[in-house]
Amino acid sequence: MHNHLVREETRTQVALIIESGEPREVMHFALLIGYGASAINPYLAVETIEDMVKRSQLPPEVTFETGLCHYKKSINKGLLKTFSKMGVSTLQSYRGAQLFEAIGLNRQLVDKYFTGTVSRVEGVGLEVLAIEAILKHQHAFFPKTEFETELAVGGNYHFRAGGEYHLFNPLTIAKLQHAVRSGNPQTFKEYTDLIDGQHRQLATLRGLLELRKSDSPVPLDQVEPAAEIVKRFATGAMSFGSISREAHETLAIAMNRIGGKSNTGEGGEDPARFKPDSNGDLRRSAVKQVASARFGVTTDYLVNADDLQIKMAQGAKPGEGGQLPGHKVDETIARIRHSIPGVGLISPPPHHDIYSIEDLAQLIYDLKNVNPKARISVKLVAEVGVGTVAAGVSKAHADVVLISGDSGGTGASPLSSIKHAGIPWELGLAETQQVLVMNDLRGRVRVQTDGKLQTGRDVVIAGLLGAEEFGFATAPLISMGCVMMRKCHLNTCPVGIATQDPVLRAKFQGTPQHVINFFFFIAEQVRTYMSQMGFRSFDELVGRVDMLNVRNAVDHWKAKGIDLSAILYKPQVPGRIARHCVQPQDHGLEQALDYTLIDQAREALENGTSVRLNMPIRNVHRTVGAMLSGEIARRYGPSGLPDDTIRMKFQGSAGQSLGAFLANGVTIELEGDANDYVGKGLSGGRIIVYPPRTSTFRPELNVLIGNVVLYGATSGEAYFNGMAGERFAVRNSGATAVVEGLGDHGCEYMTRGLVVVLGKVGRNFAAGMNGGIAYVLDERGDFAEKRCNKDSVDLGPVTDETDAEVLHAVIARHAEATHSPQAKWILENWEQVLPKFVKVFPKEYKRVLAAAHKAEIPRVEMLHQPAAVPLAAV
Amino acid sequence: MGEVKGFLEFTREVPERRPAADRIADWNEFSLPFPEEKVRKQGARCMDCGVPFCHSGCPLNNLIPDWNDLVYRNRWKDAVRQLHATNNFPEFTGRVCPAPCEASCVLGINDLPVTIKQIERMIIDRAFAEGWIKPEMPGVHTGKRIAVVGSGPSGLAAAQQLARAGHRVTVLEKNDRIGGLLRYGIPNFKMEKHLIDRRVEQMRLEGVEFTVNMHVGGSLSAEDLRKEYDAVLLTIGAEQPRDLPVPGRQLKGIHFAMEFLPQQNRRCEGDAPLDHSEILATGKRVVIIGGGDTGADCLGTCHRQRAASVTQFELMPRPPETRSPDTPWPLWPLQLRTESSHEEGGSREWSVATAKFTGDSKGRVTSLHTVRVGPPPRFEPVPGSESTIEADLVLLAMGFLGPVRKGLVEQLNLELDQRGNVTTDGNYMTSVPSVFAAGDARRGQSLVVWAIAEGRKAARGIDIFLMGKSSLP
């Protein structure tokens, strides 16, 4: 109707109201609204609630009205979440926006009813949908006895025999565990036979494909050895926090033993793991993830990596950040994430320093500076258009692009993200390969894929579609004992994997050998296929879609119309165009100012001698101080050099990312101004910026530094004698900063640290802030009403004596460092000005402090005492 | 899942058994009642697994997490509905099933599993007590006539399913009472027989006809049966016992378990033994050969008959106390099982083979001559381990070799598999059109829960055969 009215050009004259028994889940509502519904009456869902109340199936306090109210609220919240995942703010913008991709609907149907929607593999038409509807109707209206009232078991979210088919089911989980524990390849083959037999269940797109055999197979002993193939394998990004220390370290040890790569996830990593154990095992994760929350992303963390992975999105729940409920945040996790025990952690959906492909290029450059030895990888989710994004990422000089599919990693996903979010990697990977090859970009980037890879056959198919490397998460977890409880968010994992409860962690039975067995079994299967297909090395296989056929014998009534030619398309390009990675990216690092800095600071780096530098700076100098900081972290670990060992004074306009990831012991002093991202990821260093001494304007009324300053800072100090742009100190988790005014969204998602603002702030200050403290000088008196987002914070005057002392000390230090006239004025009129400061105190933080106080636990370290070292004369 | 951390808060608790001395004084069931509050806590231990292995471990795919939760929430009536959705006779399995579900319970990986069987039993016992169990009349009548031969759990399950699908079902039983092995194999102390009667009553009201003392293949020929009915289902069990062909086997006092056990069940009903002379353990030195469930049933029966002594021999080596590494979770574990009968007395020996029996001048058995043997598959005799044990009664409980060939199977000329069981197609139809088979006759000796599962699937097969499609699960 919607599309018909659009075609008739009368759509805007009416509103469409849906009355239907079918809508019941968030997705159903989102779909209807996305295709034009203005209102929905889900009468069957409503009547079901009424019936449940009548039958006393709900708690006694829940009446029909309250039950319905809860239902509406949950649908509304789910919709809000869905909109936000798609970057849409209002229902009105979502309505009719058709932000969907269809999988398995034929062109005729889509063109008529879902006009404009992408549907790449064709599939069923209206007749099949009709048959399905009739089947359901018959089940409801023609029961075999009058007592037959049971609904079908379903099993969509939890496995049920006779319900929805799941690739990981009791049989396959048990077989996999028996195989890796016994080390018996025969048992593993039984497991993969069960999974690969999936074409009967039509569980995946790859189930519809068939591997072609070569006329000239290669003897197995001439195929690349398994020990080489396993180096292409990585484990999934699961944070320490989401999974237990035992599980996280077991994965790391296993991958380090075989030369594969484990992934930190976005929870930081304990520096104790960066050094090998006495038995030679290394518990360090080779891939360090840099996600939107930047939890624990310190300079030391970054230099201890082989790969730095920028997580743009997660295949299993695209558009969403991770969430760690407060009960999983214990002392250790809080320490590593630079947050507060007991306070829940939310990763913001976007990276606040990435709003364009240029921003991404800058972050890639920043990370490459900190750790020039690491590959920079960018994680994208499979979706229509991912190929174009991947091309941009490749041009932004990523070394690796990861295409993440939809079907893995759903243990802790919100229910509304388990289904209908993301698409299979087969589609995303094929598109990526095609676009990269057509634009001659494939040769300079490696492609990785993940999302429910389970068998050697899966790996080979992914390779043929264009992947060089492969990520696995669920299968290695199962190898370590995971039984897919789907209770990861509850901290009650009974096998000690997705829990931080010490009692449950003690039940963890996994060993590195189990994981190693899994990967070698996979590699051996890959070799067998390679031999049959005539490939000696894996690189020969990459991108050879011509070795895939569509399986002929698909005889399911719903699979008849599937057309996989979009996946199997091989771009016709000249032979010189590479189909796999053949050359490294040119990161342009040689122009970095840091080579000069490192050279001149050699005394400090080698002997810890104090070094003073003084030089002009220009805006072509990007990411100044990061490579130097990387060097310090590499040599001296997280504690860096003693405070102020290296002091660099610059004059001029600094480029982007001045002092990014600046390490302990380094002070940057800038007379002039700076671009975006000053002090991004600050890791213990100190940054002082003030306008030219010769300037005549009032600094507190003029912009000194750009946007996204101190994003993801973990420790250190920063003093800015002037105003900052937007998104100041977002995700600050430990730095102390003074600034004289700022734009919108200041201190968003902050979890620790101290921010003092001596001037006006923009809108939406402190949104999602749940730790740390901010003090804002509210001269105009409109902060509480107009400027602050009070959802997660309480506001009040500075009454506590200690608070006032700390505030005074910090401002004094700012005055000392920058000669700020504003600071000078405040200190001189302290008694009059102090009442105008507003203390921004996160509610969660307050709750935890109060609980700690009640339990007589020593007060959590709450405020950053300014360093004792006096600032040198400025 | 009511209690997120229920499995951490509550420990496994099953009903206590009556003291051994008390319970061997009568033939009543050995479990003591279990309070409702306790069983609800046990329900709260269920973790509502994302992948519930229990319900795959269960041959019936019982919706275990669902009804565990309903019990926890005090919604017993909903619980019994869900229980019946997959299991026709939870009152039988709740008593005699060895509970493969519990062996595959996720909690059992590193803790004690949920008391699934006890919860099942309490749901159905309560449902009967509350009067919730009523006949479920079919919505349609097809006019098709089906004969079910054999009234064990498989036959009964099939009959109930078929009747509810609208067919006219007649159950033919060769014995004098309905129930098959439930009636005459399982001793009363494990399952009291009035449970069968009340279920049969429900089925009668649902339209199932029962004919006892009707030996198909004997007094009624198989071919006549086939002519008379649209479909015939053979649920005739696997009654051919495995024998021990060693010297002295012909001596008096050596009997198959299934000669001994039914007599006691008849006695409990107040009947005299039927066609053979009375076998009683009272005052005798008894040796049971075979260490399985049937052997344990003989053992408990002997205790109650006040045997002078009972010794149980098993050919296989003694299994480990806990799950053997060869049968990792969630597989059915190889491990030492101590049943109620073992608690009551008697001694058990493993790795024992009987070489011969010797007897007295009257041809009565007096001794078994045994030898220790090594592990399977060779069972190598251990030199010098020969031994002799005196016995007045020897019971052979060594398993079964498929359905009895003589009679029905031979008359219909049914195709059998290598193990002597009736072969069928995917719809449970035998090599003879319109004749179906299910349960032990098809599968070989197995559990009651498997019998019910087979009966249900065969019912679906028959329904499809007769109607072209089926809404039976």
Image: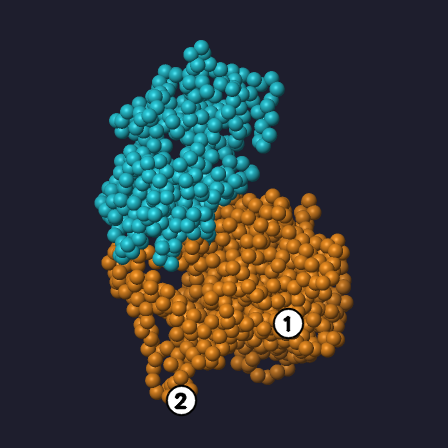
Chain colours: A orange, B cyan
Subunit of label 2: A
The image quadrant of residue A733 is: bottom right
Three-letter code for the amino acid on which mark 2 is drawn: Glu
Q: Which residue is mark 1?
A: A433
User: Could you tell me which residue is drawn at 45 percent across and 47 percent down?
Assistant: B431
Out of B375 and A730, give the one closest to the viewer: B375
A826 to the left or right of B36: right
B358 relative to A850, above or below: above
User: Could you tell me which residue is drawn at 45 percent across and 74 percent down?
Assistant: A125
Q: Secondary structure at mark 1?
A: helix
Subunit of label 1: A
Q: Which residue is mark 2?
A: A9
Q: Secondary structure at mark 2?
A: loop
Would you call the spot at circle 1 few (<14 residues within 10 Å), some (14-19), or many (20 or more)? many
Evaluate whether residue A95 shows in this view.
Answer: no
Out of A67 and A280, give the one closest to the viewer: A67
Three-letter code for the amino acid on which mark 1 is drawn: Gln
A841 to the left or right of A653: left
| Residue A109 on image: x %, y % | 45, 77
User: Could you tell me which residue is drawn at 55 percent across and 81 percent down?
Assistant: A702
A65 relative to B83, above or below: below
User: Could you tell me which residue is drawn at 59 percent across and 45 percent down?
Assistant: A181
| Residue A16 on image: x %, y % | 34, 80
Evaluate whether residue B308 shows in this view.
Answer: yes
B11 relative to B229, above or below: above
The image quadrant of residue B469 is: bottom left
Would you call the spot at circle 2 few (<14 residues within 10 Å), some (14-19), or many (20 or more)? few
Name the N-terminal-most of marks 1 and 2: 2
Is label 1 in contact with label 2 (beta carbons under 8 Å)?
Answer: no
B452 relative to B260, above or below: below
- Of all residues, the one furthest to the bottom in this rendering is A9
